[in-house]
Image (cartoon, rainbow, N blue to C red):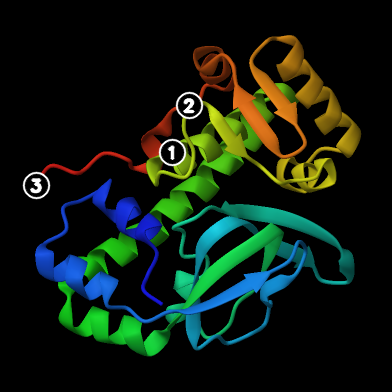
């Protein structure tokens, strides 16, 4: 298969791609795979020879504490177009697992392809580097949100981020998107109990900010959601840099 157009849009939103860059991107060979909810896509401790890109659905980066294998913390969410383990291209082993959240489709890209790109396409190399830097910026913003926002605002910030990331690649629109996370999984992300998450969801509904039914979310009042969560999308680097 060819690389997903979601990733092409991800890059084009942030920088100009020359015709030769686009041609090389679309010539990347990929290997399609599907996973069910809770299945491990890339296991912790592995030394992958290929990197994984999201095609459909949602996946999570899952970390566990030594001596407490039943406890986990979700430290990242990945949407279509995301390279979920691009850093595995340069690291010897992974310290976390990538797990499917709901049904997921992915594309695996051999590291030999990435090696050839980094040796012959310097602009694409910089853009791949940029993708890992944006992922780091998202992680830092999660830490800021966890340290400074209360439960309802913290959840609102997550919803604003995921919707913004999905719309940036054309995977959501008109205030509608899917978030196939159970409340216990939201608790793993936000650092609250499922009861606190349930109260936060109810609070956002009662404020008239969102509709939430199963995995379907509708944003009723985007400005209100942004104001409550103090969301500023600049850390997602959605605008092309001037050079």
Are the two marked residues, 3 and 1, in contact with CB atoms closer than 8 angstroms?
no
The answer to whether mark 1 and mark 2 are in CB contact below 8 A is no
Q: Identify the residue under disc 2.
A: 174
- How crowded pointer 1 is (Cα within 10 Å; few <14, some 14-19, many 20+) is rated as some
Left or right: 43 with respect to 188? left
Q: Is residue 4 left or right of residue 149?
A: left
Q: Is residue 152 above or below residue 46?
A: above
Residue 53 coordinates in the image, percent (x, y): 48, 67
Badge 3 or badge 1: first in the primary sequence = 1
Q: Work out whether residue 137 or residue 30 is closer to the camera in this orientation and state it.
A: 30
- Which numbered disc covers residue 167? 1
Q: Considering the numbered disc 2 on the image, is that residue within a helix, a strand or a loop? A: loop
Looking at the image, which residue is at 40% across and 85% down?
Answer: 111
The picture places residue 19, in percent across and down from the top left corner, at 11, 64
Q: Quadrant of residue 90?
A: bottom left
Q: Is residue 150 visible?
A: no
Observer-side mark, 3 or 2, equals 2
Check disc 3 and report the residue beneath it.
243
Q: Measuring 52% from the left and 26% from the top, which residue is drawn there?
A: 175
Label 2 CA crowd tier, 10 Å (few <14, some 14–19, many 20+): few
Dot 1 or dot 2: first in sequence order is: 1
| Nearer-N-terminus badge (3/2) | 2
Instruction: Name the foreground residue: 56 vs 164.
Output: 56
Residue 214 percent across, percent down from the top left:
77, 37
Cα separation, mark 3 vs mark 2, equals 32 Å
């Amino acid at each position: 298969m060819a690389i997903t157009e979601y990733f092409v849009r991800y890059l084009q939103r942030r920088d100009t791609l020359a015709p030769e860059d686009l041609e090389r991107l679309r010539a990347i060979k990929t290997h399609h795979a599907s996973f069910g909810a809770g299945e491990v896509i890339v296991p912790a401790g592995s030394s992958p020879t290929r990197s994984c890109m999201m095609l459909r659905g949602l996946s999570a980066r899952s970390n566990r504490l030594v001596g407490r294998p039943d406890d986990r913390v979700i430290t990242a969410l990945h949407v279509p177009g995301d390279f979920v383990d691009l850093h595995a291209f340069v690291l010897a082993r992974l310290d976390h697992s990538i797990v499917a959240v709901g049904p997921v489709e992915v594309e695996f890209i051999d590291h030999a392809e990435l090696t050839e790109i980094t040796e012959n396409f310097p602009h694409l190399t910089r853009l791949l580097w940029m993708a890992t830097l944006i992922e780091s910026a998202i992680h830092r913003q999660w830490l800021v949100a966890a340290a400074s926002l209360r439960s309802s605002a913290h959840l609102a910030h997550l919803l604003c981020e995921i919707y913004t990331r999905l719309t940036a690649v054309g995977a959501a629109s008109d205030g509608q998107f899917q978030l196939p996370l159970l409340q216990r999984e939201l608790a793993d992300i936000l650092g609250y109990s499922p009861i606190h998450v349930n109260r936060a969801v109810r609070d956002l509904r009662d404020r008239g900010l969102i509709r939430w039914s199963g995995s379907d979310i509708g944003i009723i009042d985007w400005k209100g959601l942004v104001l409550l969560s103090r969301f500023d999308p600049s850390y997602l680097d959605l605008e092309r840099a001037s050079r």
